[in-house]
Image (tube, rainbow, N blue to C red):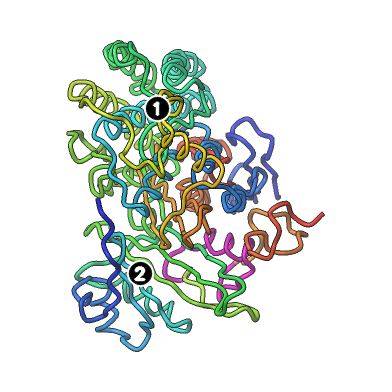
Protein backbone atom coordinates (compact mmCIF):
# COMPACT_ATOMS: atom_id res chain seq x y z
CA UNK A 1 0.00 0.00 0.00
CA UNK A 2 1.19 3.51 -0.77
CA UNK A 3 0.72 5.97 2.04
CA UNK A 4 1.11 9.69 1.70
CA UNK A 5 2.57 11.56 4.68
CA UNK A 6 2.55 15.32 4.52
CA UNK A 7 3.09 17.95 3.22
CA UNK A 8 0.82 19.18 6.02
CA UNK A 9 1.82 16.79 8.76
CA UNK A 10 2.89 17.85 12.25
CA UNK A 11 5.97 15.67 12.31
CA UNK A 12 7.41 16.67 8.94
CA UNK A 13 8.69 20.00 10.32
CA UNK A 14 7.28 22.24 7.67
CA UNK A 15 6.13 21.09 4.29
CA UNK A 16 7.94 17.84 3.58
CA UNK A 17 5.95 15.22 1.77
CA UNK A 18 7.00 11.62 2.17
CA UNK A 19 5.58 8.77 0.15
CA UNK A 20 5.65 5.48 1.97
CA UNK A 21 5.20 2.09 0.43
CA UNK A 22 4.14 -0.05 3.36
CA UNK A 23 3.52 -3.67 4.12
CA UNK A 24 1.39 -3.63 7.25
CA UNK A 25 3.29 -1.37 9.64
CA UNK A 26 6.63 -1.93 7.91
CA UNK A 27 8.09 0.58 5.47
CA UNK A 28 9.16 -1.07 2.22
CA UNK A 29 10.16 2.04 0.31
CA UNK A 30 10.29 5.69 1.24
CA UNK A 31 10.53 8.63 -1.09
CA UNK A 32 10.83 12.22 0.10
CA UNK A 33 9.14 14.79 -2.12
CA UNK A 34 10.29 18.37 -1.69
CA UNK A 35 9.83 21.73 -3.38
CA UNK A 36 6.70 22.95 -1.61
CA UNK A 37 8.61 25.91 -0.18
CA UNK A 38 10.64 26.78 -3.26
CA UNK A 39 10.86 30.56 -3.47
CA UNK A 40 13.64 31.00 -6.03
CA UNK A 41 15.99 32.83 -3.68
CA UNK A 42 19.00 31.99 -5.87
CA UNK A 43 17.34 33.69 -8.84
CA UNK A 44 16.31 36.68 -6.74
CA UNK A 45 19.91 37.15 -5.55
CA UNK A 46 21.04 37.70 -9.14
CA UNK A 47 18.82 40.77 -9.40
CA UNK A 48 20.04 42.42 -6.17
CA UNK A 49 23.13 44.36 -5.16
CA UNK A 50 25.59 42.41 -3.06
CA UNK A 51 24.52 44.11 0.17
CA UNK A 52 20.84 43.54 -0.61
CA UNK A 53 21.34 39.77 -0.60
CA UNK A 54 22.03 39.69 3.16
CA UNK A 55 18.34 39.87 4.19
CA UNK A 56 17.54 37.13 1.67
CA UNK A 57 20.01 34.80 3.35
CA UNK A 58 17.98 35.06 6.58
CA UNK A 59 14.99 33.58 4.83
CA UNK A 60 16.78 30.41 3.82
CA UNK A 61 16.92 28.92 7.26
CA UNK A 62 14.68 30.57 9.81
CA UNK A 63 16.38 28.81 12.71
CA UNK A 64 19.91 30.03 12.00
CA UNK A 65 19.71 33.31 10.08
CA UNK A 66 23.02 34.52 11.51
CA UNK A 67 24.88 31.47 10.25
CA UNK A 68 23.63 32.19 6.75
CA UNK A 69 24.46 35.89 7.07
CA UNK A 70 27.96 34.94 8.13
CA UNK A 71 28.53 32.44 5.35
CA UNK A 72 27.41 34.85 2.64
CA UNK A 73 29.42 37.75 4.08
CA UNK A 74 32.54 35.59 4.36
CA UNK A 75 32.20 34.53 0.74
CA UNK A 76 31.89 38.09 -0.57
CA UNK A 77 34.65 39.31 1.76
CA UNK A 78 36.89 36.64 0.31
CA UNK A 79 36.17 37.89 -3.19
CA UNK A 80 36.87 41.47 -2.10
CA UNK A 81 39.95 40.56 -0.05
CA UNK A 82 38.61 42.40 3.02
CA UNK A 83 40.15 42.17 6.48
CA UNK A 84 37.57 42.02 9.23
CA UNK A 85 38.49 43.60 12.59
CA UNK A 86 38.92 41.13 15.47
CA UNK A 87 36.01 42.46 17.50
CA UNK A 88 33.60 41.91 14.60
CA UNK A 89 34.94 38.39 14.12
CA UNK A 90 34.49 37.53 17.79
CA UNK A 91 31.00 38.96 17.93
CA UNK A 92 30.20 36.90 14.84
CA UNK A 93 31.42 33.78 16.62
CA UNK A 94 29.48 34.66 19.75
CA UNK A 95 26.26 35.22 17.84
CA UNK A 96 26.76 32.13 15.75
CA UNK A 97 27.02 29.97 18.82
CA UNK A 98 23.90 31.58 20.28
CA UNK A 99 22.23 30.74 16.98
CA UNK A 100 23.41 27.15 17.24
CA UNK A 101 21.91 26.88 20.72
CA UNK A 102 18.70 28.46 19.47
CA UNK A 103 18.46 26.03 16.58
CA UNK A 104 19.30 22.97 18.66
CA UNK A 105 16.71 23.98 21.26
CA UNK A 106 13.97 24.15 18.64
CA UNK A 107 15.16 20.83 17.29
CA UNK A 108 15.21 19.19 20.73
CA UNK A 109 11.80 20.52 21.66
CA UNK A 110 10.05 19.53 18.45
CA UNK A 111 11.87 16.21 18.10
CA UNK A 112 10.90 15.19 21.62
CA UNK A 113 7.36 16.39 20.95
CA UNK A 114 7.17 14.16 17.85
CA UNK A 115 8.18 11.17 19.89
CA UNK A 116 5.76 12.06 22.66
CA UNK A 117 7.71 13.98 25.32
CA UNK A 118 5.72 17.16 25.67
CA UNK A 119 7.48 18.74 28.63
CA UNK A 120 10.88 19.18 27.00
CA UNK A 121 9.31 21.37 24.34
CA UNK A 122 8.18 23.90 26.96
CA UNK A 123 11.55 23.86 28.70
CA UNK A 124 13.45 24.41 25.44
CA UNK A 125 11.27 27.26 24.29
CA UNK A 126 11.82 28.98 27.64
CA UNK A 127 15.55 29.32 26.91
CA UNK A 128 14.96 29.97 23.24
CA UNK A 129 12.89 32.98 24.22
CA UNK A 130 15.91 34.35 26.13
CA UNK A 131 18.09 33.97 23.04
CA UNK A 132 15.53 35.60 20.79
CA UNK A 133 15.45 38.56 23.20
CA UNK A 134 19.22 38.80 22.87
CA UNK A 135 18.90 38.81 19.08
CA UNK A 136 16.26 41.48 19.33
CA UNK A 137 18.53 43.59 21.54
CA UNK A 138 21.43 43.35 19.12
CA UNK A 139 19.70 43.53 15.75
CA UNK A 140 16.18 44.78 16.39
CA UNK A 141 14.68 41.52 15.11
CA UNK A 142 13.93 38.25 16.83
CA UNK A 143 14.22 35.95 13.84
CA UNK A 144 15.19 37.68 10.60
CA UNK A 145 18.22 39.36 12.09
CA UNK A 146 20.27 40.50 9.03
CA UNK A 147 22.85 41.72 11.52
CA UNK A 148 26.08 40.97 9.67
CA UNK A 149 27.21 43.17 6.83
CA UNK A 150 29.79 42.65 4.14
CA UNK A 151 32.81 44.06 5.96
CA UNK A 152 31.64 43.68 9.56
CA UNK A 153 28.50 44.21 11.59
CA UNK A 154 25.55 46.51 11.12
CA UNK A 155 25.72 48.28 14.49
CA UNK A 156 27.59 48.32 17.76
CA UNK A 157 25.77 45.98 20.14
CA UNK A 158 23.91 47.79 22.93
CA UNK A 159 25.93 48.63 26.07
CA UNK A 160 24.54 45.94 28.36
CA UNK A 161 24.47 43.27 25.65
CA UNK A 162 27.58 41.35 26.72
CA UNK A 163 26.38 41.33 30.33
CA UNK A 164 23.07 39.91 29.23
CA UNK A 165 24.82 37.19 27.24
CA UNK A 166 27.05 36.48 30.25
CA UNK A 167 23.98 36.12 32.41
CA UNK A 168 22.46 33.70 29.92
CA UNK A 169 25.67 31.67 29.55
CA UNK A 170 25.90 31.31 33.34
CA UNK A 171 22.36 29.96 33.63
CA UNK A 172 22.40 27.78 30.54
CA UNK A 173 24.47 24.68 31.49
CA UNK A 174 22.11 23.92 34.38
CA UNK A 175 19.22 24.11 31.94
CA UNK A 176 20.86 21.52 29.69
CA UNK A 177 21.02 19.27 32.75
CA UNK A 178 17.27 19.73 33.07
CA UNK A 179 16.66 18.54 29.51
CA UNK A 180 18.98 15.63 29.99
CA UNK A 181 17.22 14.67 33.23
CA UNK A 182 14.00 14.40 31.30
CA UNK A 183 15.37 12.42 28.37
CA UNK A 184 18.81 10.81 28.47
CA UNK A 185 18.06 7.99 30.91
CA UNK A 186 14.34 7.93 30.27
CA UNK A 187 13.41 4.32 29.33
CA UNK A 188 10.64 5.37 26.93
CA UNK A 189 12.96 7.81 25.16
CA UNK A 190 15.66 5.15 24.87
CA UNK A 191 13.24 2.58 23.47
CA UNK A 192 12.04 5.03 20.84
CA UNK A 193 15.53 6.14 19.82
CA UNK A 194 18.20 3.52 20.50
CA UNK A 195 19.00 1.37 17.49
CA UNK A 196 16.45 3.27 15.40
CA UNK A 197 17.23 4.75 11.95
CA UNK A 198 20.84 3.65 11.99
CA UNK A 199 23.34 4.79 9.36
CA UNK A 200 26.97 3.77 8.99
CA UNK A 201 29.90 6.15 8.52
CA UNK A 202 30.49 4.93 4.92
CA UNK A 203 26.88 5.50 3.93
CA UNK A 204 26.79 8.86 5.68
CA UNK A 205 29.85 10.10 3.77
CA UNK A 206 28.68 8.70 0.45
CA UNK A 207 25.31 10.42 0.89
CA UNK A 208 26.89 13.78 1.60
CA UNK A 209 25.67 13.92 5.18
CA UNK A 210 27.24 16.56 7.39
CA UNK A 211 26.96 18.09 10.81
CA UNK A 212 25.74 16.19 13.88
CA UNK A 213 24.14 13.56 11.64
CA UNK A 214 27.59 12.68 10.29
CA UNK A 215 29.37 12.92 13.64
CA UNK A 216 26.82 10.63 15.28
CA UNK A 217 28.01 7.95 12.84
CA UNK A 218 31.56 8.22 14.10
CA UNK A 219 33.12 10.65 11.61
CA UNK A 220 35.09 13.26 13.52
CA UNK A 221 34.74 16.27 11.26
CA UNK A 222 33.67 19.77 12.14
CA UNK A 223 34.34 22.73 9.84
CA UNK A 224 34.78 25.06 12.81
CA UNK A 225 37.79 23.08 13.94
CA UNK A 226 39.07 21.52 10.70
CA UNK A 227 38.67 24.37 8.22
CA UNK A 228 38.28 27.32 10.59
CA UNK A 229 36.74 30.64 9.59
CA UNK A 230 36.06 33.91 11.42
CA UNK A 231 38.71 33.21 14.15
CA UNK A 232 37.28 29.86 15.24
CA UNK A 233 40.87 28.62 15.40
CA UNK A 234 41.32 30.78 18.53
CA UNK A 235 38.64 28.94 20.49
CA UNK A 236 39.06 25.69 22.38
CA UNK A 237 36.17 23.29 22.20
CA UNK A 238 35.43 19.60 21.85
CA UNK A 239 33.69 18.13 18.84
CA UNK A 240 31.16 15.59 20.16
CA UNK A 241 31.27 12.31 18.26
CA UNK A 242 29.21 9.17 18.77
CA UNK A 243 29.66 5.79 17.14
CA UNK A 244 26.21 4.20 17.00
CA UNK A 245 24.72 6.30 14.19
CA UNK A 246 21.17 5.97 15.52
CA UNK A 247 18.61 8.53 16.65
CA UNK A 248 19.91 8.40 20.21
CA UNK A 249 23.50 9.07 19.07
CA UNK A 250 22.36 12.10 17.10
CA UNK A 251 20.47 13.30 20.16
CA UNK A 252 23.57 12.91 22.34
CA UNK A 253 25.79 14.74 19.84
CA UNK A 254 23.49 17.72 19.67
CA UNK A 255 22.97 17.94 23.40
CA UNK A 256 26.73 17.89 23.94
CA UNK A 257 27.06 20.56 21.29
CA UNK A 258 24.77 22.73 23.38
CA UNK A 259 27.33 22.55 26.18
CA UNK A 260 30.27 23.17 23.82
CA UNK A 261 28.55 26.20 22.31
CA UNK A 262 28.05 27.52 25.81
CA UNK A 263 31.80 27.11 26.42
CA UNK A 264 32.65 28.98 23.21
CA UNK A 265 30.35 31.80 24.30
CA UNK A 266 32.20 31.98 27.64
CA UNK A 267 35.54 32.24 25.83
CA UNK A 268 34.23 34.85 23.42
CA UNK A 269 32.97 36.94 26.33
CA UNK A 270 36.21 36.59 28.30
CA UNK A 271 38.49 37.54 25.43
CA UNK A 272 36.34 40.02 23.52
CA UNK A 273 38.77 42.39 21.73
CA UNK A 274 38.26 46.12 21.60
CA UNK A 275 38.14 48.14 18.43
CA UNK A 276 36.13 48.71 15.31
CA UNK A 277 33.26 46.54 14.16
CA UNK A 278 33.60 47.40 10.47
CA UNK A 279 36.46 47.00 8.02
CA UNK A 280 38.38 50.00 6.65
CA UNK A 281 36.81 49.94 3.21
CA UNK A 282 34.85 53.12 2.50
CA UNK A 283 33.70 51.90 -0.91
CA UNK A 284 32.11 48.78 0.54
CA UNK A 285 31.12 49.53 4.13
CA UNK A 286 28.53 52.20 4.85
CA UNK A 287 29.96 55.11 6.89
CA UNK A 288 28.78 55.86 10.41
CA UNK A 289 25.64 57.92 10.58
CA UNK A 290 27.50 60.73 12.36
CA UNK A 291 30.15 60.95 9.63
CA UNK A 292 27.59 60.69 6.89
CA UNK A 293 25.79 63.76 8.29
CA UNK A 294 28.93 65.84 8.77
CA UNK A 295 31.49 64.88 6.12
CA UNK A 296 31.05 65.40 2.41
CA UNK A 297 33.16 62.43 1.40
CA UNK A 298 31.30 60.03 3.67
CA UNK A 299 28.02 61.29 2.27
CA UNK A 300 29.20 60.61 -1.27
CA UNK A 301 30.26 57.07 -0.42
CA UNK A 302 26.99 56.47 1.37
CA UNK A 303 25.02 57.70 -1.63
CA UNK A 304 27.05 55.64 -4.07
CA UNK A 305 26.80 52.40 -2.09
CA UNK A 306 23.04 52.78 -1.68
CA UNK A 307 22.30 53.75 -5.27
CA UNK A 308 24.89 51.83 -7.29
CA UNK A 309 26.18 49.19 -4.91
CA UNK A 310 29.87 48.32 -5.12
CA UNK A 311 31.60 46.26 -7.73
CA UNK A 312 33.27 43.02 -6.70
CA UNK A 313 36.29 41.69 -8.64
CA UNK A 314 35.40 38.91 -11.06
CA UNK A 315 35.95 35.46 -9.65
CA UNK A 316 34.30 32.72 -7.69
CA UNK A 317 34.50 31.41 -4.14
CA UNK A 318 32.99 28.59 -2.20
CA UNK A 319 32.73 29.32 1.49
CA UNK A 320 31.43 26.73 3.89
CA UNK A 321 30.53 27.14 7.54
CA UNK A 322 29.31 24.69 10.15
CA UNK A 323 25.64 25.47 10.53
CA UNK A 324 23.64 23.69 13.25
CA UNK A 325 22.62 21.19 10.57
CA UNK A 326 25.95 20.66 8.84
CA UNK A 327 27.96 22.13 6.02
CA UNK A 328 26.28 25.33 4.87
CA UNK A 329 28.06 26.48 1.74
CA UNK A 330 27.77 29.60 -0.38
CA UNK A 331 29.11 29.53 -3.92
CA UNK A 332 29.29 33.12 -5.16
CA UNK A 333 30.29 33.97 -8.72
CA UNK A 334 31.09 37.56 -9.62
CA UNK A 335 31.41 39.00 -13.12
CA UNK A 336 32.89 42.26 -11.84
CA UNK A 337 29.63 44.19 -11.50
CA UNK A 338 27.67 45.28 -8.42
CA UNK A 339 25.27 42.35 -8.60
CA UNK A 340 26.26 38.75 -8.01
CA UNK A 341 26.28 36.72 -11.21
CA UNK A 342 25.30 33.60 -9.33
CA UNK A 343 24.71 32.76 -5.69
CA UNK A 344 24.24 29.12 -4.87
CA UNK A 345 23.53 27.80 -1.41
CA UNK A 346 24.71 24.35 -0.51
CA UNK A 347 22.01 23.30 1.94
CA UNK A 348 23.09 20.77 4.53
CA UNK A 349 19.54 19.49 4.94
CA UNK A 350 19.12 18.69 1.25
CA UNK A 351 21.95 16.18 1.46
CA UNK A 352 20.97 14.95 4.92
CA UNK A 353 17.43 14.25 3.75
CA UNK A 354 18.78 11.70 1.28
CA UNK A 355 19.65 9.42 4.18
CA UNK A 356 15.97 8.84 4.88
CA UNK A 357 15.59 5.69 2.70
CA UNK A 358 18.63 4.01 4.28
CA UNK A 359 17.44 4.91 7.76
CA UNK A 360 13.82 3.90 7.40
CA UNK A 361 13.40 1.05 4.93
CA UNK A 362 12.45 -2.16 6.68
CA UNK A 363 11.43 -0.37 9.85
CA UNK A 364 8.12 0.80 11.32
CA UNK A 365 6.16 3.90 10.31
CA UNK A 366 6.55 5.28 13.82
CA UNK A 367 10.33 5.18 13.34
CA UNK A 368 10.02 7.39 10.25
CA UNK A 369 8.82 10.17 12.53
CA UNK A 370 11.81 9.67 14.82
CA UNK A 371 14.20 9.58 11.84
CA UNK A 372 12.85 12.77 10.25
CA UNK A 373 13.12 14.53 13.58
CA UNK A 374 16.62 13.28 14.21
CA UNK A 375 18.16 14.66 11.00
CA UNK A 376 16.84 18.10 11.94
CA UNK A 377 15.50 19.34 8.65
CA UNK A 378 14.47 22.88 7.82
CA UNK A 379 12.45 22.92 4.65
CA UNK A 380 13.18 26.55 3.92
CA UNK A 381 16.80 25.59 3.42
CA UNK A 382 16.06 22.46 1.41
CA UNK A 383 13.76 24.21 -1.06
CA UNK A 384 15.23 27.71 -1.08
CA UNK B 1 44.05 39.71 3.50
CA UNK B 2 45.09 41.17 0.18
CA UNK B 3 44.07 39.59 -3.09
CA UNK B 4 46.71 37.39 -4.67
CA UNK B 5 46.81 36.96 -8.44
CA UNK B 6 45.39 33.74 -9.79
CA UNK B 7 47.78 30.96 -10.74
CA UNK B 8 46.85 29.19 -13.95
CA UNK B 9 50.08 27.39 -14.74
CA UNK B 10 49.69 23.64 -14.41
CA UNK B 11 53.38 23.10 -13.67
CA UNK B 12 53.23 25.33 -10.57
CA UNK B 13 50.19 23.56 -9.19
CA UNK B 14 51.11 19.93 -9.68
CA UNK B 15 51.79 19.55 -5.94
CA UNK B 16 48.12 19.94 -5.09
CA UNK B 17 46.70 16.47 -4.34
CA UNK B 18 43.81 16.74 -6.79
CA UNK B 19 46.07 17.86 -9.63
CA UNK B 20 48.64 15.20 -8.80
CA UNK B 21 45.95 12.54 -8.79
CA UNK B 22 44.50 13.52 -12.16
CA UNK B 23 47.92 14.03 -13.75
CA UNK B 24 48.82 10.49 -12.77
CA UNK B 25 45.49 9.07 -13.96
CA UNK B 26 44.00 10.99 -16.88
CA UNK B 27 46.25 13.99 -17.72
CA UNK B 28 44.55 14.54 -21.09
CA UNK B 29 41.23 15.30 -19.36
CA UNK B 30 42.50 18.44 -17.61
CA UNK B 31 41.50 21.36 -19.82
CA UNK B 32 42.56 24.20 -17.52
CA UNK B 33 43.52 24.82 -13.93
CA UNK B 34 43.16 27.85 -11.70
CA UNK B 35 44.18 28.59 -8.14
CA UNK B 36 42.55 31.72 -6.76
CA UNK B 37 41.31 32.80 -3.31
CA UNK B 38 43.06 29.70 -1.90
CA UNK B 39 40.71 27.51 -3.92
CA UNK B 40 41.64 25.06 -6.61
CA UNK B 41 39.50 24.82 -9.76
CA UNK B 42 40.02 22.24 -12.47
CA UNK B 43 38.28 22.22 -15.83
CA UNK B 44 37.61 18.64 -16.81
CA UNK B 45 36.72 17.37 -20.23
CA UNK B 46 33.04 16.52 -20.50
CA UNK B 47 33.41 12.82 -21.23
CA UNK B 48 35.91 12.23 -18.42
CA UNK B 49 34.02 13.66 -15.45
CA UNK B 50 32.87 10.37 -14.00
CA UNK B 51 36.31 8.82 -14.32
CA UNK B 52 37.92 11.90 -12.79
CA UNK B 53 35.54 11.76 -9.84
CA UNK B 54 36.19 8.07 -9.33
CA UNK B 55 39.95 8.64 -9.40
CA UNK B 56 39.73 11.49 -6.91
CA UNK B 57 37.48 9.57 -4.56
CA UNK B 58 39.81 6.57 -4.51
CA UNK B 59 43.09 8.53 -4.49
CA UNK B 60 45.03 6.86 -1.69
CA UNK B 61 47.19 9.85 -0.72
CA UNK B 62 44.24 12.19 -0.29
CA UNK B 63 40.81 10.64 -0.92
CA UNK B 64 38.24 13.28 -1.92
CA UNK B 65 35.56 11.13 -0.40
CA UNK B 66 32.87 13.74 0.19
CA UNK B 67 30.79 15.41 -2.51
CA UNK B 68 29.81 18.76 -1.03
CA UNK B 69 27.83 20.13 -3.86
CA UNK B 70 26.86 20.01 -7.52
CA UNK B 71 25.65 23.17 -9.17
CA UNK B 72 25.75 25.05 -12.44
CA UNK B 73 26.41 28.52 -13.83
CA UNK B 74 24.82 29.81 -17.01
CA UNK B 75 27.11 32.12 -19.02
CA UNK B 76 24.46 33.02 -21.60
CA UNK B 77 24.97 34.33 -24.29
CA UNK B 78 28.60 33.18 -24.51
CA UNK B 79 29.52 29.67 -25.66
CA UNK B 80 30.04 27.10 -24.23
CA UNK B 81 27.11 28.26 -22.23
CA UNK B 82 26.95 26.11 -19.10
CA UNK B 83 29.48 25.22 -16.45
CA UNK B 84 28.54 22.33 -14.19
CA UNK B 85 30.45 22.63 -10.93
CA UNK B 86 31.36 19.96 -8.41
CA UNK B 87 32.75 20.78 -4.97
CA UNK B 88 34.71 17.92 -3.48
CA UNK B 89 36.08 17.64 0.03
CA UNK B 90 38.67 15.28 1.48
CA UNK B 91 37.35 14.79 5.00
CA UNK B 92 40.53 13.31 6.46
CA UNK B 93 42.99 15.66 4.73
CA UNK B 94 40.87 18.84 4.91
CA UNK B 95 41.39 19.64 1.24
CA UNK B 96 38.84 20.99 -1.18
CA UNK B 97 38.75 21.00 -4.95
CA UNK B 98 36.31 22.33 -7.50
CA UNK B 99 35.73 20.51 -10.78
CA UNK B 100 34.09 22.21 -13.73
CA UNK B 101 32.67 20.87 -16.94
CA UNK B 102 31.78 23.18 -19.80
CA UNK B 103 28.68 22.35 -21.82
CA UNK B 104 27.22 23.85 -24.96
CA UNK B 105 23.70 25.19 -25.41
CA UNK B 106 22.47 22.35 -27.61
CA UNK B 107 20.79 19.67 -25.42
CA UNK B 108 23.40 19.85 -22.64
CA UNK B 109 24.10 16.52 -21.00
CA UNK B 110 26.88 14.74 -19.18
CA UNK B 111 27.47 11.61 -17.15
CA UNK B 112 25.88 11.45 -13.74
CA UNK B 113 28.19 10.87 -10.77
CA UNK B 114 25.50 9.10 -8.74
CA UNK B 115 27.29 5.73 -9.19
CA UNK B 116 30.25 7.28 -7.34
CA UNK B 117 28.42 9.33 -4.74
CA UNK B 118 24.73 8.64 -4.10
CA UNK B 119 24.75 12.16 -2.63
CA UNK B 120 24.67 13.54 -6.18
CA UNK B 121 21.10 12.31 -6.61
CA UNK B 122 19.28 15.38 -5.27
CA UNK B 123 21.97 17.83 -6.39
CA UNK B 124 21.82 16.65 -9.99
CA UNK B 125 18.05 16.60 -9.98
CA UNK B 126 18.13 20.22 -8.85
CA UNK B 127 20.55 21.20 -11.64
CA UNK B 128 18.34 19.37 -14.14
CA UNK B 129 15.25 21.11 -12.81
CA UNK B 130 16.62 24.65 -12.70
CA UNK B 131 19.06 24.58 -15.66
CA UNK B 132 17.80 21.79 -17.89
CA UNK B 133 21.01 19.79 -17.98
CA UNK B 134 20.52 16.07 -18.41
CA UNK B 135 22.61 13.69 -16.33
CA UNK B 136 23.07 10.40 -18.15
CA UNK B 137 22.67 7.35 -15.96
CA UNK B 138 20.87 9.19 -13.16
CA UNK B 139 18.42 6.81 -11.43
CA UNK B 140 15.50 9.24 -11.14
CA UNK B 141 15.96 12.40 -13.18
CA UNK B 142 12.75 14.28 -12.42
CA UNK B 143 12.00 17.84 -11.39
CA UNK B 144 12.67 18.33 -7.69
CA UNK B 145 11.87 21.95 -6.77
CA UNK B 146 9.47 23.08 -9.48
CA UNK B 147 6.11 21.39 -10.19
CA UNK B 148 6.27 18.46 -12.63
CA UNK B 149 4.35 20.33 -15.33
CA UNK B 150 6.52 23.47 -15.18
CA UNK B 151 7.80 24.86 -18.45
CA UNK B 152 11.33 26.21 -18.72
CA UNK B 153 14.28 26.17 -16.37
CA UNK B 154 14.18 29.16 -14.01
CA UNK B 155 17.87 29.65 -13.22
CA UNK B 156 18.83 30.05 -16.87
CA UNK B 157 19.83 33.61 -17.60
CA UNK B 158 17.31 33.97 -20.42
CA UNK B 159 14.50 33.18 -17.99
CA UNK B 160 13.10 36.45 -16.55
CA UNK B 161 13.38 37.04 -12.81
CA UNK B 162 9.65 37.72 -12.57
CA UNK B 163 8.87 34.56 -14.54
CA UNK B 164 6.75 34.42 -17.70
CA UNK B 165 3.47 36.19 -17.19
SS of the residue under disc 1: helix
Task: Using the image, name the chain to which the residue with label 2 belongs.
Answer: B
Labels 2 and 1 in the same subunit = no
Q: Which residue is mark 2?
A: B41
Residue closest to the eye, A355 or A257:
A257
Q: Residues within 10 Å of mark 1 (few under 14, many from 20)?
A: few
At x 70% / y 50%, what residue is drawn? Answer: A2
Residue closest to the eye, A321 or B32:
B32
Magenta-colored span: B115-139
Left or right, A53 with respect to A195, comes to right
At x 41% / y 33%, what residue is drawn? Answer: A287
At x 48% / y 53%, what residue is drawn? Answer: A358
Residue A229 within the magenta-colored segment of the rendering: no
Left or right, A71 with respect to A233, comes to right
Q: Which residue is mark 1?
A: A291
Residue closest to the eye, B2 or B97:
B2
Q: Is residue A65 visible?
A: yes
- Residue A6's image quarter? top right
Residue B67 percent coordinates (x, y): 39, 61
At x 30% / y 75%, what residue is drawn? Answer: B8
Q: Residues within 10 Å of mark 2 (few under 14, many from 20)?
A: many
SS of the residue under disc 2: strand
For the residues labelled 2 and 1, the Cα–Cα distance comes to 42 Å
Q: Is residue A189 visible?
A: no
Query: Residue placed farthest to the front in the image?
Result: A296
Task: Using the image, name the chain to which the residue with label 1 belongs.
Answer: A
Amino acid sequence: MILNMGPQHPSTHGVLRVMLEIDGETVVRIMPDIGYLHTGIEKTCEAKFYQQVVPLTDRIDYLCPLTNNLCYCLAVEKLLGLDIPPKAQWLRVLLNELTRINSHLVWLGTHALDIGAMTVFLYCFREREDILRLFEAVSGQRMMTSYFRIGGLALEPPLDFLNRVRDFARRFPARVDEYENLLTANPIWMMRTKGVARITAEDAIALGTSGPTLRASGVDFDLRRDLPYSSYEKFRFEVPVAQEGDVFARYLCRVRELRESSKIIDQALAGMPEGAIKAEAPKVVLPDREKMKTQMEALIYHFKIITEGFSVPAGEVYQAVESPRGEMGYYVVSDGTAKPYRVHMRAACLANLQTLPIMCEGRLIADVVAAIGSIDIVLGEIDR
Amino acid sequence: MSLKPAITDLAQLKEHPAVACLLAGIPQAIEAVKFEHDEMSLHIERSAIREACALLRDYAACPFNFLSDVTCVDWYPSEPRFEVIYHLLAIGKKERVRLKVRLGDNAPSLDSVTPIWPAANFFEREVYDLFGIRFLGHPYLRRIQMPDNWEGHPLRKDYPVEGYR
